[in-house]
Amino acid sequence: MNGRLNGIFGKIRAGTLGLGELDAFRRALLAGDPDETIAAILRFLATGQDALTGESFTIGKNGELDGAPTYRVLLIDMLGRISREHGREDAGAMARALLEKKTTADEWALALRNAAWAKADKAYLSAKTQELLEHQPWRQQPSAGYYEAFDLIVYTADVRFIPQLGAMIAGEDKALKNTAASTLDRLADMAPLDVMSYLNANPVELAEKPFLRSDYYSKADFTQPAQRAAVEAYLDRQDVPAAAKGKLIDALGRPGVFVSDNLLTAPPAEEIPPAQIAAVRQTVEGWVRSNRFPALAAPLGNAQARLQQP
Amino acid sequence: MGFTNERNRLACRLNPPSMRKLLSLLLFALLSTGAIHAQAVNRPSLLGEELSRTFPYSMSGQLIFTSGNADYQGSGAVVFRRSVLTAAHNLWDADEGWSYNVEFNRARVGRSIAKKTYAQRKFVLGGYQSFAGRYGADSSRAFAYDLGGIRFSDAPAGGSYAGHASDFRLLTGDTYNICLGYGAQNHSGDDLLFVEPAKAFRATYGAFMENNSLTFEGGMSGGPVFAELADGSLRVVGLIVAGSEDPPSGGIRAINAVGAQFIRTYLRY
């Protein structure tokens, strides 16, 4: 296996790699003896050698890479996949070692994924994700892996990232702004109560983006009383424009969904469970009946009519 | 929900800010279009009432939606019984979040609308990386992912829908293509426009393709690009996502394997 790894590496460096040869190499690694393959990968990674593959950083199904920009990233991906499939701890241990030094954002993104697959503590993952996002050389020239690492925020469901995401959303960097806003949307899908509670407790967060902020309440599951209460607290807030509240009411029971292959998390379910729809309907009817939010009578009436349709 | 006052809607739509999305897209093509050669450039024209009501053109529709406090116009096409394919930027942006009050007016001709329906669910295809790139959302990298879908509780076309195909050769070869949408820059926005490229599209980045033999108008974003198959039938093979008047160029997001999977999974109703 050592020879095979070095052979492919030599071809990449020489530019003599044939069409489909990298994919065949990946299949061979997956089909090989895991002990031997893992040992060979670790040995190669320890040399620090690397080369560009010509592929782009592309995530496929289950967080596995369909494309790796460098040979080391390819091997770190394969190490994680093989370790996960065979219940080995090698990828997790290697990830922890790698995350002690700033190599590249792409390698860190993969190392964070491998550590998560190895059941690393979420507080540790959050801390390392924070390091990655704040490392200035990576932030100033973000690679694909840098952006993909935002999925760790969703995976760890850590709302302490909200101020940082909010600052990116308010910033001038359009790519970071878009990434941060979609991350927060996905975080609200993953941990709706935590996000809503954080935003209610910190009203200055996203105060300049009231319509965007409303989206983060639209994920609420009204079968859960605490989530319903968080939405009611938001609708009671005097600092939120009525139009933004109206937007939230329009989205209740039908929030927007981002669909993508990510390092660790899957898109939310495409269908809202009928029990959740029924809970939204009952809640809205209750609000209308009791005149709970008189200033929102019009959007609530529209929502009630919509929710009564089959 | 939606507009109750046609005059208000028109006033809003024709406000310069209400066109900013497509206008911002116009700037990008300046960066990516190569040297301009003297050549025929086709511009959007009225399709006419009869064809606008003829399948599969009649699967196209006008999209009206609210983003923040402003109303916008886009286009879309019915690709399954209760589902419409459109551009992702019609459905979400990082400043205002998800669009709302999303109304689809299928086969609209002037004030006459074959069917008006309101969105039930909205989906955007694209992960963190899709927004990456030097120009952010106005980059070919972002346009390459610019695919969104809407599901309705009512079938916009009574259960009929346009078929789709995922094959870049239907855009880059000599296959006949026609692009449709409700342009509101030089036309009213309430009539279906068409434009046929004089030459094949050119792949720019991933599923994003450009063509400097045609232009699109603001409001056509999300409108379908059809290709004629060997049996004479038309299939949706892409969407209008960007345009430039000077230099003339139109950008589309082709339906690739990932896009087709998105349609099959999230818009299969």
Image (spheres, coloured by chain):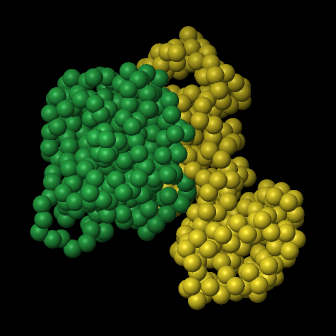
Chain colours: A yellow, B green
> Relative to residue A295, is residue A1 depicted above or below?
below
Percent from the top left, x then y, of residue B172?
Answer: 32, 59
Question: Percent x, y for residue A155?
Answer: 71, 52
At a point 68% along the width and 50% down the height, the residue shown is A265
Residue at (39% x, 37% y) in the render: B163
Q: Is residue A134 left or right of residue B223?
A: right
Image-based side of A91 in relation to B208, left or right:
right
Point 61% across, 29% down: residue: A272
Where residue B181 appears, as percent x and y from the top left, is 26, 41
- Measured along the vertical axis of the image, is residue A112 above or below residue B16? below
Front residue of this view, candidates B204 and B67: B204
Q: Is residue B68 visible?
A: no
**A171 left or right, relative to B46:** right
Q: How many discs mark residues in the rendered view?
A: 0
Residue most extreme to the top = A289
Task: Quarter of the image for the N terminus of chain A: give it.
Answer: bottom right
Residue A199 horizontal side relative to residue B51, left or right: right
Q: Position of residue B219 (x, y in %)?
A: 27, 43
Q: Is residue B150 above or below residue A22?
A: above
* Nearest the eye: A100 or A225: A100
Q: Looking at the image, which residue sits at the far front?
A: B231
* Quadrant of the rendered image containing residue A190: top right
Q: Residue at x 14, y 43 (%)?
A: B45
Vertical arrangement, residue A288 with respect to residue B133, above or below? above
Q: Could you tell me if residue B60 is visible in this image?
A: yes
Looking at the picture, tell me which residue is in the foreground, B98 or B218: B218
